Amino acid sequence: MAVPPSSAPCWKQLATGGLSRIRTSNVGTQMMIKRLQLSNASVDQKALEIHAYYAKWERGLSDEIAQFA
């Protein structure tokens, strides 16, 4: 499954609490979720970071990406 473009609304949804609903056993994703929960960054900054993470690791995170829809 392809990563949606950075302009897709799913990234802001993930940045505003949607990440906590993603089912994952990937330790890297779990660490990113926890760090972003504690972060004071803006929603837009978080959304861009989440997009960059999934764009980089797309091949190994297809099960998570499929949950975005």
Image (tube, helix red, strand yellow):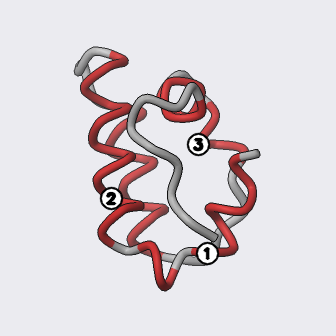
Dot 3 falls on a residue whose secondary structure is: helix
Give the number of the mark in front: 3 or 2.
Answer: 2
Residue 34 percent across, percent down from the top left: 42, 47
Dot 1 falls on a residue whose secondary structure is: helix
The answer to whether the residues at label 1 and label 2 have Cβ atoms under 8 Å apart is no
16, 9: nearer the viewer: 9
Please tell me the numbered disc located at residue 19: 3
Task: Tell me how far mark 1 sits from mark 3, CA to CA.
Answer: 15 Å
Quick one: label 3, few (<14), some, or many (20+) residues within 10 Å?
many
Q: Residue at x 25, y 26 (%)?
A: 45
Please tell me the numbered disc located at residue 5: none
**13 sits left or right of 12 in the view:** right
Please tell me the numbered disc located at residue 53: 2
The answer to whether the residues at label 3 and label 2 have Cβ atoms under 8 Å apart is no
60, 30: nearer the viewer: 60
Residue 26 percent across, percent down from the top left: 52, 77
Residue furthest toward the bottom?
A: 60
Earlier in the chain: of badge 1 and badge 2, it is 2
Task: Tell me how far mark 3 sits from mark 2, CA to CA.
Answer: 12 Å
Residue at numbered disc 1: 62
Q: Residue at x 36, y 62 (%)?
A: 55
Q: Residue at x 50, y 34 (%)?
A: 11
Amino acid, disc 1? Ser
Q: Residue at x 59, y 33 (%)?
A: 10
Dot 2 falls on a residue whose secondary structure is: helix
Amino acid, disc 3? Leu
